């Protein structure tokens, strides 16, 4: 979710950036260092969690949760926060010096890269169960069927709309692509665009494209298929209608939210990480709905975003077991609900999510969207980053004049060849 909301730079973990680090480099570093054992002497009662909670409020919420879990388990849990874009590289450096923390909170799209190189412990082997977690969210934290990452909360995208603008125009909330196109065109007036979304050359844009690709039956393993071409053509049509700003090719999701809050967009595609900022403008009456689909009755399939708690393989099995208990506590139903109510995310645990719906009914549509959401790395694992980079290039080409078919054919070639 970012780049980067003004009050919470760490929130990029919501939408995931995609691993930019070379997979070969990860494999060499982890295999040659992390798996050789733990060289650093550690305080037996102090455990470290590395995360991206650099924002003051998130850092405080996490510290409070870690203090509660530490007291429950009779240990001290310390937090080490670094910018979201640095978690993977920091973990690699620590692996090479045999000083990995006990727990690393990875962006879920980056976790498979570390897991594929053998750097993570199977959480089920440490006693963590997944009985109350939806299958899609279990997949979100898994790689090749092994459960490596426990999510405390997840997020996805939704259609945010300015209720006053739609009411004044007398138009209903769109539910299909045709309705969205007509409504966006009608609501485009003066300096206000009908819709804002991120199509920038970064993971933000890919994250926002997946609901259109997947809901239309497209697939990340076949980027130049007719279904994916249709989805990108739909974005091009919105741009050609004048319903999207030409700047959409440069906007991040934070930029999109800024435009919506400023009244420069009647609707936007965005996620719950923006709610805290949206609520600071009391005159803005916003609501959310599921992202429109190609045909009425189709499932609106969005991307799961968020981070997962992992236990690095350090060679110290006793510390790994205690780290697993800390993860289990942080990802417990009670802690998930507390974290989700603070952060506006959706709890990963089904029981916690049911209570969350009761507490924040205005975000109920988001919970429905999460129920059908997919993990970006479920099919491709560590290969997702290559597909993401190829799609980013395709957006830039197609939305600035090239045909969608040509742009996506090149994207498929890049994703296949790695160039």
Image (cartoon, grey):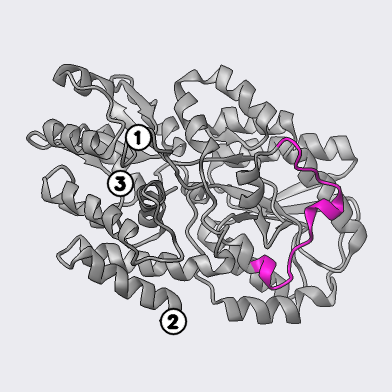
Question: How far across and how far down the image is residue 340, in percent?
Answer: 59, 32
Residue 148 located left or right of residue 159:
right
Circle 2 residue: 417
Q: Main secondary structure of the magenta part?
A: loop
Circle 1 residue: 159
Foreground mark, 3 or 1? 1
Q: Dividing the picture into quarters, in which one does residue 164 lie?
A: top left
Up-down: is 78 above or below 165?
A: below
Q: Residue 199: tell me if it is visible.
A: yes
The residue closer to the viewer here, 344 or 405, is 405
Quadrant where the image shows the C terminus:
bottom left
Callout 1 secondary element: strand
Q: Give the CA separation, mark 3 to mark 1.
A: 16 Å
Circle 3 residue: 255
Mark earlier in primary sequence (3, 1): 1
Magenta segment, which residues?
114-132
């Amino acid at each position: 979710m970012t780049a980067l909301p003004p009050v919470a730079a760490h929130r990029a973990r919501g939408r995931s950036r995609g691993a930019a680090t070379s997979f070969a480099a990860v494999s060499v570093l982890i295999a040659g260092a992390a798996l050789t054992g733990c060289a650093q002497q550690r305080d037996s009662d102090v455990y470290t969690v590395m995360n991206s909670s650099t924002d003051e409020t998130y850092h405080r919420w996490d510290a409070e949760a870690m203090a509660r879990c530490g007291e429950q388990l009779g240990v001290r849990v310390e937090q080490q926060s670094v910018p979201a874009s640095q978690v993977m590289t920091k973990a690699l450096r620590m692996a090479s010096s045999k000083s990995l923390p006990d727990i690393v909170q990875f962006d879920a799209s980056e976790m498979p890269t570390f897991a594929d190189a053998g750097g993570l412990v199977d959480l089920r082997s440490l006693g963590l169960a997944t009985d109350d977690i939806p299958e899609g969210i279990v997949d979100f934290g898994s790689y090749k069927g092994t459960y490596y990452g426990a999510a405390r909360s997840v997020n996805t995208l939704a259609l945010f709309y300015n209720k006053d603008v739609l009411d004044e125009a007398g138009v209903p909330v769109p539910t299909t692509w045709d309705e969205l196109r007509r409504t966006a065109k009608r609501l485009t007036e003066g300096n206000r665009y009908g819709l804002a979304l991120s199509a920038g050359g970064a993971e933000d844009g890919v994250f926002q494209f997946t609901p259109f690709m997947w809901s239309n039956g497209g697939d990340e393993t076949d980027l130049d298929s007719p279904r994916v071409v249709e989805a990108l053509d739909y974005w091009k049509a919105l741009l050609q209608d004048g319903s999207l700003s030409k700047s959409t090719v440069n906007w991040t999701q934070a930029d999109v939210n800024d435009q919506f809050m400023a009244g420069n967009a009647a609707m936007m595609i965005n996620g719950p990480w923006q709610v805290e900022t949206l609520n600071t403008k009391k005159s803005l009456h916003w609501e959310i709905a599921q992202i429109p689909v190609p045909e009425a009755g189709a499932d609106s399939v969005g991307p799961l975003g968020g981070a997962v708690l992992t236990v690095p393989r350090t060679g110290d099995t006793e510390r790994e077991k205690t780290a697993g208990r800390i993860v289990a506590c942080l990802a417990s139903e009670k802690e998930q609900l507390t974290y989700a109510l603070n952060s506006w995310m959706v709890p990963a645990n089904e029981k916690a999510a049911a209570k969350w719906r009761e507490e924040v009914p205005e975000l109920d549509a988001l919970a429905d969207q999460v129920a059908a959401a997919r993990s970006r790395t479920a099919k491709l694992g560590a290969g997702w980053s290559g597909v993401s980079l190829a799609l980013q290039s395709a957006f830039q080409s197609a939305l600035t004049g090239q045909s969608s078919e040509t742009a996506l054919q090149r994207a498929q070639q890049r994703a296949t060849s790695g160039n």
